[in-house]
Amino acid sequence: MIKYLKDHTSRNERWYLLLVLVIALTLRIGYLIEMKQTLFLTQLRLDELFHRNWALSIANGNIFGDVIFFRAPLYAYWLGLNFAIFGYDIIIPRIIQHILGTISILFLYFLARKLFGKKTAVIATLILATYPPLIYIENKLLFESILIPLLIIFFTLWYYFKENPRPLPIFILGMVAGLICITRPLFLPLLLIFAIIIFFTFKEQQKKRSGLYPASIFLIAALLPIAPVTIRNYLAGGNFVLIASQGGINFYLGNNPSADGFSATLPGPSGNRWGNIDMEQPVAELLGRKPTASEIDNYWRSKAFEFIINSPAGFLTLLGKKLYYFLNSIEIPNNGSFYLYEKFSKILTYLPLGFWILGPLGLFGLWLGWTEKKGVEIIIFIILYTILIVLFFVCDRFRLPVIPFLAIYAGRAVERIYDLFKNRLQNKLIRWGISLTILFVIVNSNITGFQKGNIASDNFAIGNLELAAGNYKNAIAYYEKIPTDKIAIQDVHLNWGTAEWRLGNYDKAIQQFHKEYSLFPESYDALANLAHLYTIKGKPEEAIWYSQRAIRLKPYSPIAYVDLAIALTDLGHFDRAESTLLSYLQMYPEDRFYEESVLAGIQIMQNKIETAENTYRSILSRLRINRQPIYEPEYQYSSEYRIGGSWKIFQANIYYSLGHIFVKRQNQDSAIAYFKKAIELHPRFGDAWIDLGTSQYFTGDLVTADSSLRTGLRFQPENYRGWYNYGILMLEKNNVAEAELAFRRAISINPDFLPALKELSELKDKK
């Protein structure tokens, strides 16, 4: 690259390129530093969270994965490689992404210079270096951060290789195209179109087959990155999925009777909190069995076409609306609002560029480029890509792939307008000025009344970050600022209630869940959380009512069945509780580990010890901590709370439960082995340490028992049974004073705990 720069650029060009690259990287690193002071960087959400979890699974050794890819894999594997090399670090991948973005500016310079000359190249690179939405997205764990550099590299190579259409350059071009496709499968149709362009571009008049040869090389090279993904999908799921299976559901999200053109909202009770189970269940009901990934994909695609066929006017209106959004200056939020981040960043605030000016200039420049017959392939790409996006749904990050190329044409427009001024061609200036004014008005209009952002939605977003960070009081403070009596935002009271729940304010949590349900009667999570909290508060009748309401809304979702089973258990209806969970697990036999663990607990209550043991062992045989994540709703904080916060802790709880089974059988050695396994997975597991110490006491290992009990009580000082057991151990070691203190501590926690009261009474009598 350095040699190429020396050979193909002047001294002034090199100084300019150094300057613009320094400016670009400084702005990007500066923005990263600004964001480091906020929760935006650490509390990932939506796609960023999904990518992070997937990448961690890869970095921890699950390279092949477990299921067919729902999303294109290149970004997740690239991020996983980062984690594998540097460890889990939230800063390093972002720095690398900013470096990639900066390097891509260099490629853009050569591309723009090749098409229109140095002046256009200078303007285009300045635009890309200082374009705020691009800096904003490059700092997120999203695929655009590698997709955009790949696209710039592709078109730079394209125009240089056109002059030298030898097999190796065309092969390299095809490889880059394949990488683009496994980053964003939406580009697959463009792959075929560019193969056709290659066929006609390189076809010699007298050799009809000469165009087929380079086109074939291009396609074969493009298939090299794609084919392993396809083969891997087939091996993982026994089903043909070329790259990823999300195309159908995304197409439906943008084309259904409730679609607004920009929201990824699934009609029905799932709303914007839909996940894998919501996609799968309607297909399973239709087929009467568990569907394959391609069947799910095809189902939702066919639902979208059903809407298009049955409501052509509605579809065309929606299509026009989406095109308007795509060409509008508003940055439509997806995975975060640019306007919210802007409030925390001086760099985003003070940089003047935006689509408000790039849009009109870029669109006008496209027309100029078309008339000049320069960069026609890029113009074709922009038009076709716009059509593809508009067929789905529109947002800020989906528009970004065309921004570098619009920057080139905006630069060309500025250069040509300057030439008109310099040559005083007033008539042409007036005509062009009118055209630009019309484009400016269209791009900067807001005929749909779309809000760039408001205080309520900002407070909700920040509150959610505080909630995810465990700052529950801060989260509540932000939720309290939202005037929900005037503006109804879904999930405000749901997440507010979750924060109260985590603080132990059950009555306040119930109040918030009731408010959510009253505002949004299809809120499954509000109903399920109400059922669970009423169970905790010892009101099983209310818990049964709410869990049954939740089941009617989403009969395929397991959470409410668990709440119903627990409530039935509290009423002493063990058989009904067991049959409730068994019937659900028979209807939906996929891995439902949490539900099965609750079932095992109910079986223990019925003294079905062997059955419970088999259930626990079945869970352990199938449970993998390092699983490829499936796409699930982000804000199910209450659900995560139920399993302890992670599957690793959940597995520790299973080992702990098995330990208790062996305690019941008076097999202390086996119990000790399982308690140790639980502690190995969860070293701060207070109950496991306490019960380990108790079992060690019964085996006569008093020294180790002493250490284990002390450790457990340090982690869980409110465990009154632990203090009682420690007191018994102290009596065994003839340490009466320490025993008395332990018994008193147990009674201070639970004044009605009879065994401790009895021991204290006996100690008093002995005195």
Image (tube, helix red, strand yellow):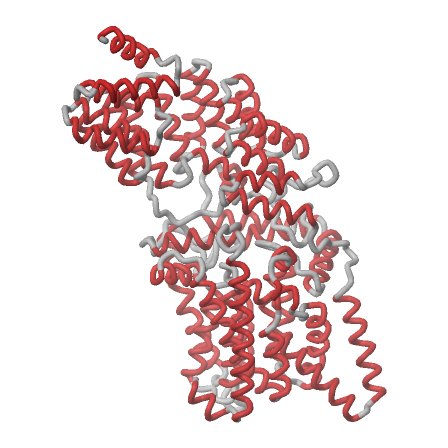
Q: Position of residue 583 (x, y in %)?
A: 44, 26
Q: In the image, 733: left or right of 568?
A: left
- Quadrant (top left/top right/bottom left/bottom right) for the C terminus: top left
Q: In the image, 695: left or right of 167?
A: left
Which image quadrant for residue 232?
bottom left
When the figure is inspected, residue 549 is found, relative to residue 475, above or below; the finding is above
- Quadrant (top left/top right/bottom left/bottom right) for the N terminus: bottom left
Q: In the image, 504: left or right of 431?
A: left
Which image quadrant for residue 711?
top left
When the figure is inspected, residue 217 is found, relative to residue 582, above or below; the finding is below
Q: Position of residue 176 (x, y in %)?
A: 46, 73
State the residue in front, 679 or 216.
Answer: 679
Q: Position of residue 67 (x, y in %)?
A: 40, 49
Q: In the image, 704: left or right of 641?
A: left
State the residue in front, 59 or 299.
Answer: 59
Q: Residue furthest front?
A: 767
**Tally of numbered tags:** 0
Q: Residue furthest top?
A: 765
State the residue in front, 271 or 502.
Answer: 502
When the figure is inspected, residue 543 is found, relative to residue 376, above or below; the finding is above
Q: Residue at x 67, y 41 (%)?
A: 481
Residue 617 seen in the current view: no
When the figure is inspected, residue 330 is found, relative to residue 698, above or below; the finding is below
Q: Residue at x 48, y 78 (%)?
A: 215
Residue 651 seen in the current view: yes
